[in-house]
Image: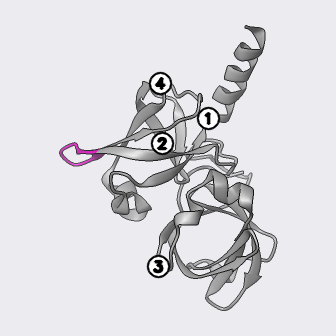
Amino acid sequence: MFTGIIEQLGTVRNITKDGDNIHFELAADFVGELKIDQSVAHNGCCLTVVQLTNDTYTVTAIKETLDRTNLSSWTIGTKVNLERCMVMNGRIDGHIVQGHVDTTATCVGIEPQNGSWKFIFSYETPDVTVEKGSVTVNGTSLTVVDSNPQSFSVCIIPYTFEYTNFNQLKIGDKVNIEFDIIGKYVAKLIGNKA
């Protein structure tokens, strides 16, 4: 489980294809605190640490993960939002995030807002958002501003813009989306009753 509060940006150092799998080697400041078999969210996608060196760690993405996320577009040098799993002994600053990416969305608009930015995303699945509800974009816990069928917007404060990979997003880029877990259960229950 995660909170959607990004700890730091990691950098992809090496990419190795192994059948349908891809091994990603990343550099991050907290490598010395990691252990094998630990869960880390990468742009919101929960992956398991499988190898460690002094300054890098390796995770493996299988075909299902690569098909559902933006990981297959990573190249050496890609900056990745990172969050280690939550510790259940304090406040949850974001919202409950599973690290299970539902789909990707495309950035279709970036609007400067006199000190902040509005990012607009579109997606193709029947999932729903609600105004002032939660959504996770590339692992970042955010509040939905505008909610429309198959699109939504979020506003990004300067701190989030500086310390996440939002500062590198361009129109046309794909991002990982995890819709709110409670909203998904409500939508499923209502759908089953209809």
Disc sitting over residue 133 in the figure: none
Q: Are marks 3 and 4 in contact (CB under 8 Å)?
A: no
In the picture as drawn, the residue positioned furthest to the front comes out as: 19
* Percent of width and height locating residue 30: 61, 77
Residue wearing tag 1: 180
Disc sitting over residue 149 in the figure: 4
Helix, strand or loop at mark 3: loop
Whether residue 37 is situated above or below residue 181 in the rendered picture? below
115 drawn magenta = yes
Is residue 43 visible to the viewer in this orientation of the structure?
A: yes
**Quadrant location of the C terminus in the rendered image:** top right
Helix, strand or loop at mark 2: strand
In the picture as drawn, the residue positioned furthest to the bottom comes out as: 54
Residue wearing tag 3: 77
Helix, strand or loop at mark 1: loop
- Label 4, label 2: how far apart the Cα atoms are: 18 Å
Badge count: 4
Badge 1 crowding class, 10 Å Cα cut-off, few under 14, some 14 to 19, many 20 or more, is many
